[in-house]
Image: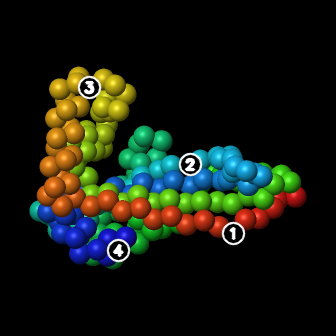
Amino acid sequence: MLASERIRELITGGFPARFHFRVELWSEGRWVNDLERRVEYEVFVRYLALEKLYDVTQMVNDRPLSLGRFARVEDAENAIARPTRVPITAISSKRRQYYQVTLDVEVLSVTDLDELNRWLRGELRPAIGGSRNPGTALTSGLRTLATRLLGGEKREYEKRTDPFRVP
């Protein structure tokens, strides 16, 4: 997940990476598949330049859970990839079901970095709730655009299980 040289350069340059995991249980329909359940969580990786360590934090119920600090990027990657049990159980059904997992990897913008730092310090005023004024939202958009123009990264990976039945 951190194998890309570009992502490593951005992280060591002060931009943290966000790994957004989405696990979904779907049931197959005749014409349209139905989403039964969904769980999402995030893992953040920041490089602490003064300590020369990668800090890995998972957000659990809006609270940071440290997964550790690592000198080697491979160890940080192992912490991100550690198995995580999500509370989704397939239900008894006549329909076939399948799990779909999506991973979005994004090197964060400056605004996202500020918001992440506030969140990690325990401030419970995320800008998402509409509490920002329009000027701040415009500034955020411009910073995000500038980050992308400077080479910010975003990638998406998706995997789906084979369909199965639960009697």
Q: Which of 104/60 is in front?
A: 104
Residue 88 locus on image (x, y percent): 66, 52
Cα separation between marks 3 and 4: 37 Å
Which residue is denoted by mark 1 in the rendering? 162
Helix, strand or loop for disc 2: strand
Q: Is residue 111 visible?
A: yes
Helix, strand or loop for disc 1: loop
Marks 1 and 2: CB-CB under 8 Å? no
Residue 52 locus on image (x, y percent): 17, 68
Mark 4 residue crowding within 10 angstroms, few (<14) / some (14–19) / many (20+): some
Dot in front, 2 or 4: 2
Marks 4 and 1: CB-CB under 8 Å? no
Which residue is denoted by mark 2 in the rendering? 39
Which residue is denoted by mark 4 in the rendering? 75
Q: Please state which amino acid type lies under the numbered disc 2.
A: Val
Nearest to N terminus: mark 4 or mark 1: 4
Cα separation between marks 4 and 1: 31 Å
Mark 1 residue crowding within 10 angstroms, few (<14) / some (14–19) / many (20+): few
